[in-house]
Amino acid sequence: MRTETNIQQKGSAQIPNGEDKRARKQDKEMKIIERRLTGKQSQEACEDGIVATNDFVAVIDGSTSKTPKRISEDMENGRYAMLLIGKYIAQMPAQTSLTEFCTGITGTISDIYCSKGFDLQQLSRNPQERITASAVIYSKYYNEIWMVGDCLCMVDGKLYENSKPYEDILAERRATIIRESDNKEKFFIHDSARDVIMPDMLRAMQEQNKTYAVIDGFPIQQDKIKVVKVSADTQEVVLASDGYPFLCPTLAESEARLKEQIVRDPLNINTFKATKGMMTGNLSFDDRAYIRFSIA
């Protein structure tokens, strides 16, 4: 029996169907419509990042460290992770696949651990000591969005999420503690309710790259990465970090909903429940990154 490859004619060249679709997408142009990057305290300490090249658009959300251990002496682990991943994505060839990205960035971070003298066995046993980040990445070549961790995306107004499995339970527990308190003002100065759930958050991190995927220098659990196929007629895509509690099709709408949340429910215990809320002196409860672009 002879097996034939289905071929479509394009000019004088013969290109397999799948490659032809990718070639057509490669001919299209990504145009940045709007973007915003805002640190909850300052831009210098912001642990979120945005990368936009001719081939990839990405939002990276570095995880705030939950232990005193620092991989870099110069900055917090979340910011260091974000900068490393952003630099890696910025130099990726157009045809880099999801698997190649996962393997490559894992190796890059693992090499950093080794170069700085960290014990990989120790880090394997204690995920909370690793540098960790989530990312949402659009690949123009594959016309896909890769959701590694809990960043958000929107395709022509349709929202996609990839929440951590333990987050809602712990957020509800924290909310209950605060709602039952007679003095809610004290939580703006010191969030003792977060202290209560912190041991469970650390235990949940033992499931990192087991029950949920993150980027941390250890093999990424690829079956926990949500892959969103972008149709050929898609007009606009939004990528964002979870610093936006209610992601909307435009930056103005997303910012308005965030402002409303901060005014009405600043501790994040009612309309939006989270494992942290507003703290005195902060601009928001989390860093935030937003980028909207068209595919034409």
Image: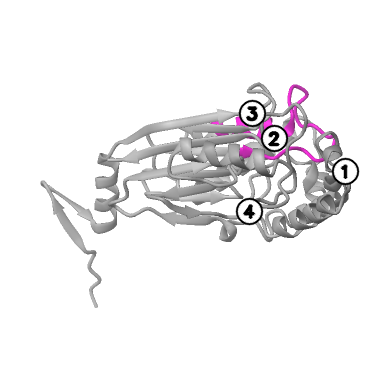
Q: Name the residue under label 1.
A: 183
Looking at the picture, how far across and down is residue 186, in whole percent? 86, 38
Q: Name the residue under label 2.
A: 78
Q: What residue type is labelled 4?
A: Ala
Along the viewing direction, whichever of 179 and 224 lies nearer the viewer: 179
Looking at the picture, how far across and down is residue 144, in whole percent? 41, 50
**Residue at 74% across, 48% down:** 275
Residue at the bottom extreme of this rendering = 1
Along the viewing direction, whichever of 127 and 292 lies nearer the viewer: 292
Numbered mark located on residue 213 in the image: 4
Tell me the CA gap for discs 4 and 1.
37 Å
Q: Which quadrant does the N terminus fall into?
A: bottom left
Q: Name the residue under label 3.
A: 39
Viewer-nearest of discs 3 and 2 = 3
Q: Which of marks 3 and 4 is nearer the N terminus?
A: 3
Which quadrant holds residue 128? top right
Viewer-nearest of discs 3 and 4 = 3
Q: What residue type is labelled 3?
A: Gly
In the rendered image of this protein, does residue 238 appear above or below residue 73?
below
Q: Do the residues labelled 3 and 2 touch (CB within 8 Å)?
A: no
Along the viewing direction, whichever of 248 and 221 lies nearer the viewer: 248
Q: Which amino acid does label 2 sit on?
A: Gly
